[in-house]
Structures are given as structure tokens and as C-alpha cells.
Amino acid sequence: MINTVTQTTVATIPVGTNPWGVAVTPNGAFAYVTNQATNDVSVIDTASNSVVATIPVGSNPVGLAITPNGAFAYVANYLSSSLSVISTATNTVVGTVSTPTYPIAIAITPDGASAYVATNGDNIVSVISTASNTATASVPVGSIPRGVAITPDGAFAYVSNRMSDDISVISTATNTVVATISGVALLPEGIAIKP
């Protein structure tokens, strides 16, 4: 845990083996951390900086995202080709969603209706309805998509493609690629959008 004012480490919190992704609930009360090697998610109470729950999920969990209302955490299980849906009220898995191979990153639309999942194995972004936890669209993108971020207005999803060195821009209205941005850094991975 880093204090962003002083830029100093104020706490070090032991979690599972090979922690990968972190997402904080909208109210700031809890942080969820995926642990690749132990196939679980650590839940950290941000007031006490302690782990209050450990949730078993699929194999090799990596990216995760929390719905805007804070009710669910979606976890990408890279080697299971699935998402685990965690209820943040009970810290239990309440659903599992099959995906194309090697899901790695997730972003959820501001209205909470859809999760956009970048999958390495098929060069696809899978669109998941959070109401039904089923796939509603499959969008071909560049080679080895690694990151996904959605604009604050929910109109577009930006996807970083590691091996084609470009960004795919998906219209969330049509779930089609409407632009490809070339000339970005070599092997792009993570992506974020300025608020």
C-alpha cells in the first residue's frame, strides 16, 4: 500500500503466491487481489490492511474487475478459459462463465451491463452480459490482446494488442472494431483511459 501524497510505502500485505491483478471496490473498503500460483483471490480490508478472505477460483487467475455497484468481482482464469463471478457480499463464487482461450483482462462498462474480456488464445474480445453471465458478442481484434479499458461514457472499449503493436477501438453500441491505432509502443500490454 502506497501513500500517494508522500509516495512512500505504508503497508506490505502478504497474499497468495504470484499476485497479478488488483481491483478496489467503489467505496474503497476492500481490495481484491488475484494470486496466479495459488488459484485464489485475496480480499484485503483497506482499513486494517489485512486479508479478511481467500476465495478459490479457476486456474491461473490474472485480471479482474469489480462492477460499478460493487456487488460482484469478475476474475479471468487464464488456464481455465473462464471467469469466476464473486459476490462481494459473501466473498464466494456465485457463477462461472466460459470464455475463449486464455482470458487475461476485464473491463466493465460504466452502467455495469457488460464485461469486456480480452482473450489471448483466439485474438478475441468476448462481451459478457452481467445480468445473465453469458456471452453476447465475440469481437475479433489484433494479435494477443492483453489489456482492455472503457471510456467514461461507455461508448468505446480500447484494447491493447501485444503482438500486432496496435490498439483496437471497439464501439460498445455495435460491438465491432471501428478503428485500429498503429504505431504504439512495442509489445503493448496494459491500457488505461484518462478520466
Image (cartoon, grey):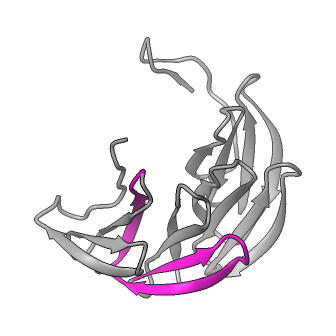
Query: Which secondary structure dominates the residues rendered in magenta?
Result: strand
Residue 153 versus residue 157 in the image, above or below:
above
Left or right of 122 on screen, residue 185? left
| Residue at position x 70%, y 48% in the image | 70
Splitting the image into 4 quarters, where does residue 121 fall? bottom left
In the picture, measured across the screen, residue 183 lies left or right of residue 98, that is left
Residue 140: percent from left, percent from top = 36, 86
| Residue 158 image offset from top left, x and y in percent | 34, 64
Residue 89 spot, x, y in % from top left: 85, 49
The region drawn magenta spans 124-152
Q: Nearer the viewer, residue 22 or 158?
A: 158
Query: Measured along the vertical axis of the image, is residue 29 above or below residue 166?
Result: above
Q: Is residue 171 above or below residue 56?
A: below
x and y percentages locating residue 63 in the rendered image = 55, 60
Does 75 sit left or right of 142 as displayed?
right
Q: Residue furthest top?
A: 6
Residue 109 visible, this orientation: yes
Q: Is residue 100 visible?
A: no
Residue beneath the point at 37% across and 56% down: 190
Q: Is residue 141 magenta?
A: yes
Residue sitting at 57 percent across and 85 percent down? 136
Tell me: 139 left or right of 142: right
Q: Residue at x 73, y 47 (%)?
A: 42
Residue nearest the viewer, comparing 71 with 90: 71
